[in-house]
Amino acid sequence: MTSNSLLSAAAALALVTGLSAPAFAQDAAPAQSEAAAPAAAAPASDAAAVQVTPAGDLVETLKASGKFTTFIQGLDATNLTGLLKTNKNLTVFAPSDAAFATLPAAELEKLKTDKTAMQKFLLHHVINAPVDSSKIQGARGPVPSGAGDQILLDGSDEAGALKADGATIVQADVRTGSGLLHVVDKPLTAGAGDAQAQAPAQAPAQTSGTN
């Protein structure tokens, strides 16, 4: 799988602009400006603590941070580094090393030993179009990923959190020389956003005892 597998920017943008508005949007305040784009409800975790500063192209920026070694190693092993360095209109959802730690160890090791699976996994974190946070806020819907499947983008949270496949964007809109970077608190998994939305609410645990 190469850069030819990436869907056209026009197709991606068409889906982005067609994201469905959430049910509460009629009464919600207008979307925040791009200057206030970073997610407001970032979880207090090591993954959320990563702050990235633009330092060249997408790959150079990730390397300069020093917090994305697993992601970069995967790109190098699957010949995707050049794609992220040379394409100018990509959007990448980048899990930090702390975010990758949320994957079961056996699942991560399986990916590392299967380059085809790893390549598809990483391409699922890429959109072949610029999708900044202003396109996600106040909307919810799928966009095509570089893997040929779909990423569910969700900005319908009333607290302001922005999500991709259920992962929270902890730093949005890092503009690099070869595209837009969003840092996420866990790796994206196709269908995870829908599964999270459809999961029934958990009832409070019952405690037993006598009066």
Image (cartoon, rainbow, N blue to C red):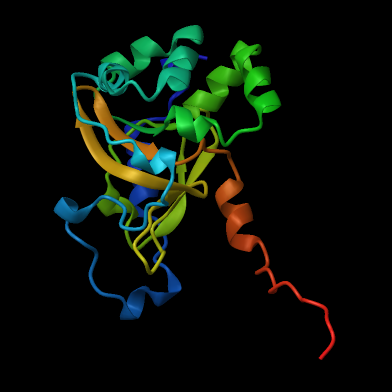
Residue 21 lies in quadrant: bottom left
Q: 204 or 34, which is in the foreground?
A: 204
Q: Position of residue 158 (x, y in %)?
A: 38, 69
Above/below status of 68 relative to 142: above
Above/below status of 64 relative to 90: above
**Residue found 37% across the figure and 25% down from its top:** 67
Q: Position of residue 59 (x, y in %)?
A: 31, 18
Q: Position of residue 31 (x, y in %)?
A: 24, 64
Q: Is residue 155 left or right of residue 149?
A: left
Residue 65 lies in quadrant: top left
Q: Is residue 43 left or right of residue 110?
A: left
Q: Residue furthest bottom?
A: 211
- For the C terminus, the image quarter is bottom right
Whether residue 112 is visible, yes or no, is yes
Q: 53 or 89, which is in the foreground?
A: 53
Above/below status of 176 relative to 132: above
Q: Is residue 78 left or right of residue 113?
A: left
**Residue found 19% across the figure and 27% down from its top:** 54
Q: Position of residue 52 (x, y in %)?
A: 26, 32
**Residue found 34% across the figure and 78% down from its top:** 26
Whether residue 146 is visible, yes or no, is no
